[in-house]
Image (spheres, helix red, strand yellow):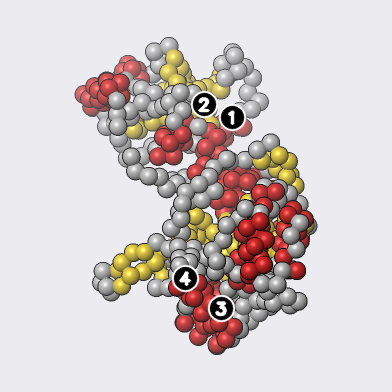
């Protein structure tokens, strides 16, 4: 809510707004014919010597970020940078000087004039016309004090972006990362598609969905937790042997520095390959994204140097658990032994948890956070991988890997299960877990099983979390820094 000071500032600005209207000026005109941006002018006139004056006419527009000498000097910022405006009676008519007197910090203006460089070396526009394009009624936050409250930065992102170039650059880098991922996939022959956000049966991941209601059909629907089962239907239909989607997913879970209820996922499927090809794909895409926002594949996150150049290390989950805890899960006979081993490490599990759930719980608690340099963790338990082909050597495991960097999972990939009878059994096992109270266990999707009965080619599938990848590549401490409008509890 606006405080007393804000109300005073607003009243003063309202008076200036009325002053503009008394001058016959529309403070919110429809357009302005801009001819150049600040950065382009800096590049164009890089060789202009200090003290030089030109007759080159330009039209610039942006936000007033500083007013000096009663408006004689204005720092004008556009999305590319800053340029100085010189407002003087030698160039401006009395009517336009009157407009300058009614300007405030934060106002958006358009300026026409000629280029010069001051004796001190500042590229400057000698204003011959100044037009108000949007009169602001509230002052922008102070550069160093106005957005000390982190919550305000996220709740009122527009204020954060007005004030902080760092925040603007992170979101621009996010755009470059997504564009690079898309371009590299298109270059490899992938077809970009879109699949339903509203689903009758949410599937493709272990997560609790959001529920909504369609009034006309009187039907409960779910916001999707993953596009997986629909992307696989496209493989069945032969739309393409290579498909991908970059889009939002929704999971009804808690909020943390690495979790937001809506997040962006790149998910792709390629026919006639297995998860080995997806490892190469992950390394290629992540290293190319790093190059898009930096000078190479070496990055620094939180002061730690990380090298993303391929190839990445590969290690089995059971081997990593043995290395860090001394427990050889492959030597444990069943769920009873596995639960006992986990409990000896202080990890509590439900009495119904099987061998695979216990292995994964120990991995999460004792290993995951230690995986700083890029690593593909293979051999995920079958119990927690209902859409994945079984490991060719050990049926307790699957051909699934997750890629970890800085202790975070950034990618998840499978050799995709395409046996409809086995898929039905896996779904039924998941439904039994739901009956025992696991709200994140997957539902039976009979239509997807029917689709597999028409034949899906062997395939590799991969999902990359865009938000975490952007966090990593921009050295951002919170997922809220890389999402323009993160989910917030209302005040």
Residues 264 and 374: in front is 374
Q: How many marks?
A: 4
Whichever of labels 1 and 4 marks the residue nearer the N terminus, that label is 1
Picture coordinates of residue 27, whole percent (x, y): 29, 31
- In the displayed structure, 199 sits above or below 23; it is below
Q: Mark 2 and mark 1 in contact (Cβ < 8 Å)?
A: yes
Name the secondary structure under disc 2.
strand
Residue that label 3 marks: 426
- In the displayed structure, 192 sits above or below 66; it is below
Q: Nearer the viewer, mark 1 or mark 4?
A: 4
Residues 72 and 216: in front is 216
Q: Which numbered tag is attached to residue 29? A: none
Could you tell whether 85 is left or right of 370 in the image? Answer: left
Picture coordinates of residue 25, whole percent (x, y): 26, 28
Q: Nearer the viewer, mark 1 or mark 3?
A: 3
Whichever of labels 3 and 2 marks the residue nearer the N terminus, that label is 2
Disc 2 packing (10 Å; few <14; some 14–19; many ≥20): many
Please give the name of the residue rendered at 39% of the width and 13% of the height, measured from the top-left corner.
Answer: 70
Residue that label 4 marks: 436
Whichever of labels 1 and 3 marks the residue nearer the N terminus, that label is 1
Name the secondary structure under disc 1.
helix
Could you tell whether 386 is left or right of 444 in the image? Answer: right
Could you tell whether 5 is left or right of 488 in the image? Answer: left
Q: Quadrant of residue 10?
A: top left
Disc 3 to disc 2, C-alpha distance: 63 Å
Q: Quadrant of residue 416?
A: bottom right
- In the displayed structure, 482 sits above or below 458; it is above
Picture coordinates of residue 116, whole percent (x, y): 55, 21
Residue that label 2 marks: 83
Residue that label 1 marks: 42
Disc 1 to disc 3, C-alpha distance: 62 Å
Whichever of labels 4 and 2 marks the residue nearer the N terminus, that label is 2
């Amino acid at each position: 809510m606006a405080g007393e000071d804000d109300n005073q500032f607003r009243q003063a600005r309202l008076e200036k707004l009325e002053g503009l209207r008394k001058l016959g000026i529309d403070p919110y005109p429809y357009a302005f014919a801009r001819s150049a941006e600040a950065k382009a002018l800096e590049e164009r006139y890089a060789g202009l010597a200090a003290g030089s004056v030109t007759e080159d006419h330009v039209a610039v527009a942006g936000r007033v970020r500083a007013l000096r000498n009663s408006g004689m000097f204005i720092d004008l910022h556009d999305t590319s940078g800053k340029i100085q405006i010189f407002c003087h009676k030698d160039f401006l008519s009395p009517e336009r000087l009157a407009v300058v007197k009614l300007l405030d910090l934060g106002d958006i203006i358009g300026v026409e004039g000629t280029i010069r460089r001051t004796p001190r070396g500042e590229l400057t526009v000698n204003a011959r016309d100044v037009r108000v394009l949007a009169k602001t009624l509230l002052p922008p936050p102070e550069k160093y004090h106005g957005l000390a409250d982190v919550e305000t930065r996220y709740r009122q992102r527009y204020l954060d972006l007005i004030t902080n170039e760092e925040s603007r650059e992170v979101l621009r880098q996010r755009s470059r990362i997504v564009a690079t991922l898309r371009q590299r996939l298109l270059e490899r022959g992938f077809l970009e598609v879109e699949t339903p956000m509203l689903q009758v049966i949410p599937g493709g991941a272990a997560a609790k969905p959001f529920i909504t209601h369609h009034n006309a059909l009187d039907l409960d629907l779910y916001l999707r937790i993953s596009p997986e089962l629909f992307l696989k239907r496209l493989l069945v239909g032969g739309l393409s042997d290579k498909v991908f989607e970059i889009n939002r997913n929704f999971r009804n879970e808690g909020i943390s520095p690495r979790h937001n209820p809506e997040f962006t996922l790149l998910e792709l499927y390629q026919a006639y390959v297995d998860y080995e090809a997806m490892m190469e794909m992950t390394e290629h895409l992540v290293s190319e994204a790093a190059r898009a926002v930096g000078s190479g594949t070496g990055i620094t996150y939180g002061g730690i140097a990380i090298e993303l150049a391929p190839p990445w290390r590969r290690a089995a989950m059971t081997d990593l658990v043995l290395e860090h805890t001394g427990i050889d899960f492959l030597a444990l006979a069943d769920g009873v032994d596995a639960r006992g081993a986990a409990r000896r490490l202080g990890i509590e599990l439900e009495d119904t948890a099987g061998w695979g759930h216990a292995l994964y719980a120990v991995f999460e608690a004792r290993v995951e956070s230690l995986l700083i340099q890029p690593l593909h963790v293979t051999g995920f338990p079958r119990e927690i991988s209902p859409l994945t082909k079984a490991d060719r050597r050990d049926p307790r495991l699957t051909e699934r890997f997750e890629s970890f960097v800085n202790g975070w999972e950034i990618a998840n990939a499978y050799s995709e299960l395409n046996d409809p009878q086995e898929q039905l059994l896996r779904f039924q096992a998941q439904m039994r877990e739901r009956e025992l109270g696991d709200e994140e266990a997957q539902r039976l999707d009979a239509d997807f099983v029917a689709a597999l009965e028409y034949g899906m080619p062997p395939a590799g599938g991969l999902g990359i979390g865009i938000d975490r990848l952007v966090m990593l590549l921009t050295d951002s401490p919170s997922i809220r820094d890389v999402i323009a409008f993160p989910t917030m509890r209302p005040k």
